[in-house]
């Protein structure tokens, strides 16, 4: 399999990096700690950046006259405009990175299910976004974005990693915008992109094949839009099964009837949710090695991210 790129991520600083939460604590995250050996982090604490020290009184989102405000109830301080200005100034110049990991349940960094309090006493609703987290989602909807709480779910973690590493690979080739690199990217990621969106990957292939008079800049921009669209929804089991059957076809003349039946039985157990995808992948990998299939050997579908980042016993994808 190919060497992995080094993704670039923006991380809430309070996660494993600094004691900058309102109470002076730091959030532990074994996954983020593990990621440090594989990615490049840039950390940010929006609340400290707008002048709120450590420790500090908590802030919350309060709805006043149908408008949302970021308030520090203990002092009555309204930091709404400060946070909006910081988010705009921080996010606008960002370039050459692949995603975010943000603090969940935070009125600044949270992405979803954030508490919004009424102006008078009453129960908060929980359908909000943090001011910074919401700005991130609005400005970079195409990137790999998650909060550290959701990443404890191994299925969501894998979805995040596949998207993150795919975007990082594309970012690498986008630097030089060589047509040959785009051909290689499409070829090596074909099975993975098929698992995301089979119709779209055909269009992406045709676009490259029918380059016509498109300049490299226009071709990359058009391909990038299609790639973002393809990665928009996570891979589901039926799509994986279709790709696995497609890969099996590469060995139709080399495998005997018993070997094919064994694989199809494993595939059916995966479909039923009683066997991990990893079993089917490893069977195919063994045949890739045995029959020296260089085309499949370079397919990122079989190893889209470093395997150390997901427990091998997990039923995933």
Image (cartoon, rainbow, N blue to C red):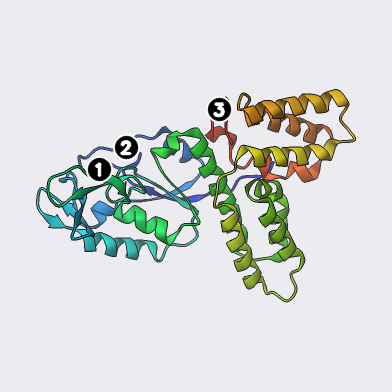
- Which label's residue is closer to the chain start, 3 or 1? 1
Position in image of residue 138 (x %, y %): 40, 59
Task: Specify few, some or many for label 3: CA neighbours under 10 Å numbering under 14, 14-19, or 20 or more.
Answer: few
Outermost residue on the bottom side: it is: 213
Position in image of residue 112 (x %, y %): 36, 47
Position in image of residue 196 (x %, y %): 62, 48
Q: Which residue is mark 3?
A: 314
- Which label's residue is closer to the chain start, 2 or 3? 2
Q: Are marks 2 and 1 in contact (CB under 8 Å)?
A: yes
**Could you tell me if residue 292 is visible in this image?**
no
Q: SS class of the residue under badge 2?
A: loop
- Which label's residue is closer to the chain start, 2 or 1? 1
Q: SS class of the residue under badge 1?
A: loop
Distance, label 3 to label 1, CA atoms, is 32 Å
**Residue, x 15% and y 45% (percent of image)?**
57
**Residue, x 50% and y 60% (percent of image)?**
96
Q: Quadrant of residue 230?
A: bottom right
Distance, label 2 to label 3, CA atoms, is 25 Å
Q: Which residue is mark 2?
A: 27
**Residue, x 19% and y 58% (percent of image)?**
79
Outermost residue on the right side: it is: 253
Q: Which residue is mark 1?
A: 21
Viewed as shown, does residue 298 lie left or right of 304?
Answer: right
**Residue, x 58% and y 27% (percent of image)?**
312
């Amino acid at each position: 399999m190919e060497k992995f790129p080094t993704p670039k991520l923006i991380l809430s600083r309070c996660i494993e990096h600094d004691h900058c939460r309102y109470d002076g604590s730091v959030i532990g995250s074994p996954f983020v700690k593990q990621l440090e050996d594989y990615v490049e982090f840039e950390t940010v604490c929006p609340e400290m950046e707008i002048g709120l020290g450590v420790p500090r009184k908590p802030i919350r989102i309060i709805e006043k006259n149908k408008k949302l405000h970021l308030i520090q109830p203990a002092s009555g301080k309204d930091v709404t405009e400060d946070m909006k200005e910081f988010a705009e100034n921080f996010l606008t110049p960002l370039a050459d990175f692949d995603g975010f990991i943000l603090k969940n349940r935070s009125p600044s960094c949270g992405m979803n299910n954030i508490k919004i309090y009424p102006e008078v006493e009453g129960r908060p609703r929980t359908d909000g976004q943090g001011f910074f987290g919401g700005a991130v989602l609005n400005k970079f909807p195409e990137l790999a974005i998650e909060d550290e709480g959701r990443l404890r779910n191994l299925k969501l973690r894998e979805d995040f990693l596949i998207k993150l590493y795919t975007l990082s690979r594309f970012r690498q080739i986008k630097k030089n915008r060589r047509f040959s690199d785009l051909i290689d990217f499409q070829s090596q990621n074909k099975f993975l992109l098929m698992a995301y969106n089979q119709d779209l990957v055909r269009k992406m292939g045709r676009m490259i094949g029918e380059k016509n008079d498109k300049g490299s800049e226009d071709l990359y921009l058009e391909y990038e839009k299609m790639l973002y669209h393809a990665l928009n929804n996570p891979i589901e089991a039926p799509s994986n099964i279709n790709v696995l059957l497609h890969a099996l076809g590469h060995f139709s003349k080399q495998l005997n009837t018993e070997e094919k039946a064994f694989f199809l039985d494993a595939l059916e157990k995966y479909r039923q949710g009683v066997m991990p995808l990893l079993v089917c992948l490893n069977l195919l990998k063994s045949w890739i090695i045995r029959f020296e299939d260089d085309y499949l050997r370079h397919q990122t579908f079989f190893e889209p991210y470093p395997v150390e980042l997901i427990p091998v016993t997990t039923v995933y994808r």
